[in-house]
Structures are given as C-alpha cells and as structure tokens.
Amino acid sequence: MNDEDRGHAAALPQALPLDDHNRRWLAHTHPAGWTNPTPQGRYNLVVVGAGTAGLVTAAGAAGLGARVALIERDLLGGDCLNVGCVPSKALIRSARAAADVRDAARFGVRVPPGVEVDFPAVMARMRRLRAGISPHDSAARFRDLGIDVFLGSARFTSPHTVEVGGQTLRYTRACIATGARASAPSIPGLSDVAYLTNETVFSLTALPRRLAVIGAGPIGCELAQAFARFGSEVFLVEAQHGVLPAEDPGAAALVKQALERDGVRVLCCGQNLQIRGTAGGPQLSVDSHAGHYDVTVDQILVGTGRTPNVDGLGLEAAGVAFDRHGVTVNDFLQTSQTHIYAAGDVCSRFKFTHAADAMARIVIQNALFFGRKRTSALIMPWCTYTDPEVAHVGLYPKDAEAQGLAIDTYTIEHAKGDRAMLDGESEGFLKVHTRKGKDAIVGATIVARHAGDLISEIGVAMTAGAGLASLAATIHPYPTQAEIIKKAGDAYSRTRLTPRVKRLFEQILRWRR
C-alpha cells in the first residue's frame, strides 16, 4: 500500500479493500490531488453536499445557466452510490442467484452437489459494478458541466457566505444537501465491541459465519436475508413485533415467513438487549417473547436509525434552524433563511434516493425561478428489496383513518395471476385503497418478487388523477405480473354492477332480443 492509498484508507475507511475496483471508484468520487477552483464572484447557487439531492440540484441549475458551486466533504454520490442503494442491490442480486440455485429443483433443474457461494467474488462483483457506475457522479463530470467542485468541509460563516478549504464562497441562494449517516441505538455494551453499519458492511471480504442484525427495518431485513442466503447463520433482533413494523401487517408477515424460510432466526419483541465481548466474539443477551437467548456471533450489523448531517456546518452563523431531526424546512423546502433551501435526508422523513431527486427538482424551480412547488404534493413510492419485495405508495389504512377518510380496499392475491404462477412467484398480493364508493386511488401496497417495478403504474395513475376504472381499461400484455393491477381495476368495476343496475341491463337485453 503506497502513501496515497494509506491516506485514502485513513480518511475513508469504507473504501477498503483498496483493490483496483475501489481505486477506480475513489478516482471518480474523491480524486486524490484534486485542486479546488478559485471562487467566481457571487454564485447563483451554492450546494453543500454531493449526494443525490446535491448532484441533481447542481446539475439541473447549471444546465439552466446558473453559476453553481458544489461542495463535498467525503465521497461524491452520497449514500446511494457508495454505501447504500448501489452496493446493497448488487449483494441482493447475488443472494437471489444463490437462492435460485438452491431452489432450482422446483423448476425441474438439477444442480450438481457442491455448489457454493464465493463470497469474496460476490464482494468483488459489487465493487466492480460500483466503480462502473461512479463516473456518473464523478468530480470530473460535474466540473465538465460547468460547476465549480470543491472538496472539503463546508462551514457557513454568514447567511450569504460559506467557507471551504480556506476559501470563502459568496452566494445568492444555497441548498443544504448533506444527507444523513448511520446511527447506533443506545444498547448496553454496544460501544464496547466492534460493529458494522451500512457504511462499513460493504468493506467485508470474508463471510461472517455468525451474524447478528439489530433492527428489522428495510436495511436490516434486506441484509439479513442476503447474508443468510450467502451462508451466514443470521439472528435478526427487533424491539417491536415481527419485522418491517411500519409496513402493512400482511406484507410484513410474508416477509417474516420468507426470512425464516431462508434460515434467519427472528428474535422480535426483543427486550433487555445487552452486548458484551467474549473470547468467541460479541455476545448478545436478549429476551424474545417467552424465551431468553444468549447468542455469540462473529459480527454485529446495526441497521437502525439515521442521524442528519448538521454538525460542523455553521448553521447558527447562517441563521438556519435545525434540531435532532435535521434542518427545518417549509413545504417549499425553504429553511428559516428563505434564500437557503435544503433537500434530501438532511431535512426529509423520506430517506430515499428518489425522494432526494424529487426534492432537488423542487429546489431548482423554487430557488431560481420563483416557483411555488410543494413537497406535500409529491406522490412518494418506496420499496423494501427483500424477496419478496414490499412496495408502497400513498396512504395506509391507518393513515386514512387518522385523516377521517373512508376507504375501500381491493385485495388481489398473486396466485390469481397466470404469470406469477408460471414464474413460481405466486406469493404475495396487491392491496389498492380508494375513496369510499369511488375509484380514486389513495394508496397501494404490493408484495411480490418484483414489487418495486410494479408500483410505478399505480404511482403514475395517482399523479395523473386516473382511478381504478382507468387501470381496468388499460390493456396489459399477457402474461405479465402487472395484470394483477388490471384485476384490481376489474374488482372495482364489479362493484358498480349493483342489483338495480343489473335489473336495468336485464330489461335492456330483453328489449333487444
């Protein structure tokens, strides 16, 4: 390892191992020897943070002719490229391949004995793919878009100035897009042992034989299932009942069944969790339902909680209000200083890449072109990439009840779809919630192997104001799993055939004989 590599390893431990793939990735996202430009007078927009929200804001504003500066402390691309969506989905795809091989006999395919997961190769594939995607978020690309890219820690020094690398940048508008970081819960003994988060788990080169995952939210469930499929003995600890406690209960129950089928030991309703180091590895002591468990593992992965990155930004000097939840913004994404905006995980309850992208577009319109776009108008879908996946958009029934909104729910089992049956993927369902007695869609949940790809059709319908009747009238190619959405539309149409309407139709048909 040369001096440059040692410097990267010390400053960016998530970059380990420093193989050719990670060197190529770092050359794009945090290039060694990068020289910050000389500030160009007053900028139309200074963007602090080069994750999804920051990159989209900077690129969009520059493309429209604004003079833009972009500041990044660590890695361009933010969580999504570096320690989130990209690496996790690469692992999940490899884990799905392992499960498909394991289950090949269901499809009449004989797999020779001795097939096993090559975990170092899985991780090398992830690093190779991440490096291949990284040019899209690279410092050089954004420089070539006409953006002044500054690497270093930003600190606001007044409502109209920010300092980075000893230089002061003046601006008319600014956008805070510093994202969030993994945070650890207050568990006795956790700080006394080494543990992984999403920011370090992708640096593994050897498969943990025994892995404890703390937190059964989306991150915890996705990675618990993936590592179980790779061959780890996985213990998933969750303080609440079941898994995915914020999701539709029926959807969460199916995911829990799938996790257990893959060998994950789910210790939910976990109480009195304590951790201590032992010669054999970290030991977790936890009460789950009526049992007490002492579990010794090789690694602990903490998959709970995110902390917004507001420390050290000098927000007080800028007069920008913030709290433990992040930067405070209004519906137009303005902070307490109306010329300073925020977007992404640092200010939003939606911790998704696509949410950051959508908010960045609002910032561009509102900050630079007198727009009045509202975040409350966004139709926000999301997906948990377990197998099966759980995708959702709009309201849950509990949300509708809290708002005093009466709804109808149409539930279609995937087993009623021919393609799902043929694919051997009949587990799951679609639930569509509409206003009572109407076809106006207010929310939907899909549980399916490719739920994330299916939910967008419903999101489009909600955005366009099209209801279930329109989906019923839309021709879907046969056989596809998306036909389940048409079936939900058909279910609504059948409710319109009331006894009175049916009698009227019978009279018309008798008259036409």
Image (cartoon, rainbow, N blue to C red):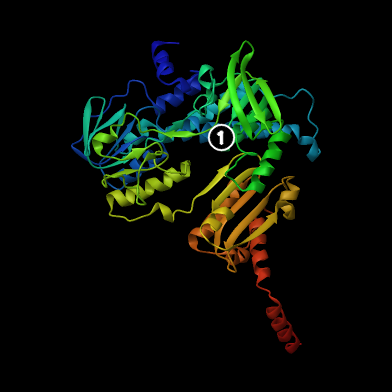
Seen from the viewer's position, the closer of residues 23 and 93 is: 93
The answer to whether residue 287 is left or right of residue 30 is: right
Residue 94 is at least partly visible in this image:
no
Q: Which of the 4 image quarters holds residue 346?
A: top left
How many numbered discs? Answer: 1
Height in image: 437 above or below 176? below
Position of the C terminus, as image quadrant, is bottom right
Q: Secondary structure at mark 1?
A: helix
Q: Which of the 4 image quarters holds residue 259?
A: top right
Residue 234: x and y, percent?
66, 27
The answer to whether residue 492 is left or right of residue 185 is: right
Height in image: 139 above or below 206? below
Seen from the viewer's position, the closer of residues 400 and 354 is: 400
The answer to whether residue 82 is left or right of residue 254 is: left
Height in image: 179 above or below 428? above
Residue 111: x and y, percent?
78, 30
Question: Around disc 1, counting alpha carbons within 10 Å, would you say few (fewer than 14), some (14 to 19), or many (20 or more)?
Answer: many
- Dot 1 corresponds to which residue? 219
Height in image: 412 above or below 109? below
Q: Which residue does the image show at 35% across and 46% down from the upper left?
A: 329
Residue 445: x and y, percent?
60, 51
Q: Which of the 4 image quarters holds residue 117?
A: top right
Q: Which residue does the image show at 21% across and 31% down from the upper left?
A: 168
Q: Which residue does the image show at 44% across and 33% down from the upper left?
A: 307
Residue 457 is at least partly visible in this image:
yes
Q: Which residue does the image show at 53% across and 64% down from the upper left?
A: 466
Seen from the viewer's position, the closer of residues 507 and 3 is: 507
What amino acid is at disc 1?
Ile
Residue 50: x and y, percent?
37, 35
Position of the N terminus, as image quadrant, is top left
The residue lying furthest to the left in this view is 41
